[in-house]
Amino acid sequence: MIRLASLAVLAIAGLLAFGAFYLAKGTEGEPSLITTGTPDGPNPASEAPATPEVEKLFFLRGINFDEGEITLVLFPPDADTERLIIRDQDALRAAQDRAYVNTMTPDGEAAGSLLVSMMAETPDEVIAQIFRDDVLIASVTCPNGTCGHFGDSPDLNFAGLTDHAVPFQPVMDEFSDYDAYLETIEAIAQTPDFMLLDRRPLVDFPLPRRPSHLIVELPTVVTTDVAFNPALHEALVQTAITPLLPEGASLDWVRVTELPAAILADADNNQPVLVNGAPIPFTDARFFTVRARINGVTTLPADVYNALTEATRNQVDTDARFSEFVSATLGADCLDCYVLRIEGGRTDAARAFDWRSESYYLNYYDLREAP
């Protein structure tokens, strides 16, 4: 069994609200809001200067370094790489009262916000994420136009933490075996040289088993029987398919679906023939698509398709009825000039309609020293 840490994503937002930033933090309970003021604490309102004091969010303050390993992922706007990963616990502790972000210019204006708005950019940008034992516990966001990539003069102080960034290699794995996928997740959780960090999916993790499958399209039912029962034909198809399945494959479902009435069309371009601006329906026969989903395979041998064609074909000959229909409707002698147009098409032999191989994707970081 894989012991996956419960994901408690607690947002930290660098927000301006009544002149203060708010740091949302927490672990397993409800997140708490902690107001942060200037380094020396907020000034009383009566002593507030005419020019607003610069508010600084010290995003590492209050982080408990005595429980698990803390990892900081920075997304600095001026870095050569899209992210920096810091794991040095001593360096992180030392930066608690020095590393900050300010989302306002010294005069209290949100620089660049108009430009960003005109460019339809995302108004907020994540600039840091804090993880405990590879589980996200806090995020720091700020307006894109101030301390983000579009900021005129970002006021950021990472307190030398960028010098402690560790080398990493992004890994994008694809698995065709579900057990191998789960074993890799377990290995990442147990090995400090590998981490998920911001690549951990927020939902559906680990992914549920998704076996390979094949959808077979069987001969279209063409019937003049007003009492035709789709459920009986589904049972017929199920009986025909089951003994032909290869080892490890299983029948998931069979569906018989009635199609809209066929319409008269030009044989040269398959465009509807119109009378008084409306298409002409052919109501002398009904048409049904027949499809079956088989799990565990993505293809079938040719002899199986041939056997399914013979076992499930239910098609009456409509040529005579169609000739009479064309003559009666259009008074035309050129019967080859017209065809029946069936929405969704007509299939006369069993074939592969759709398929998907079993696959699982996993993105993570290799944090070992580069060779």
Image (cartoon, grey):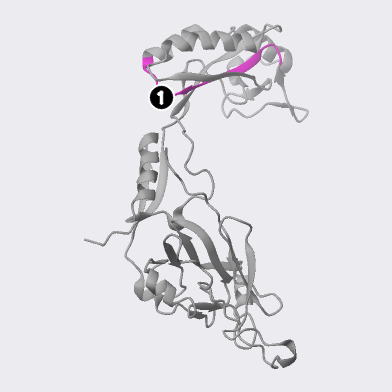
Picture coordinates of residue 34 (x, y %)?
Answer: 63, 71
Q: Which residue corresponds to the image point at 49% horizontal and 36% vertical from the top-left?
A: 208
Q: Determine the image quadrant of residue 13.
A: bottom right
Query: At which x and y percent is residue 147?
Result: 54, 76
Q: Can you say whether 332 is above or below 368 in the image? A: above
Left or right relative to 90: residue 371: left
What stretch of residues is rendered in magenta? 283-302
Q: Is residue 205 visible?
A: yes
- Residue 275: x %, y % from top left: 75, 26
Q: Nearer the viewer, residue 177 or 115?
A: 177
Residue 158, image x and y in percent? Answer: 45, 77
Left or right placement of residue 156 versus residue 108 in this view: left
- In reply to whether residue 16 is colored magenta, the answer given is no
> Disc 1 residue type?
Val
Q: Is residue 40 above or below residue 133?
A: below
Extreme-right residue of the structure: 276
Locate the C terminus by quadrant.
Answer: bottom left
Q: Which residue is mark 1?
A: 297
Q: Is residue 121 in view from this perspective?
A: no
Element assignment for label 1: loop
Residue in the foreground of this view, choosing between 77 and 96: 96
Residue 254 falls in which quadrant of the image?
A: top right
Q: Residues within 10 Å of mark 1 (few under 14, many from 20)?
A: many
Q: Is residue 291 magenta?
A: yes
**Above-or-below relation of 296 to 222:** below
Q: Return the residue nearer the eye: 208 or 302.
A: 208
> As rendered, which of 327 and 218 lies closer to the eye?
218
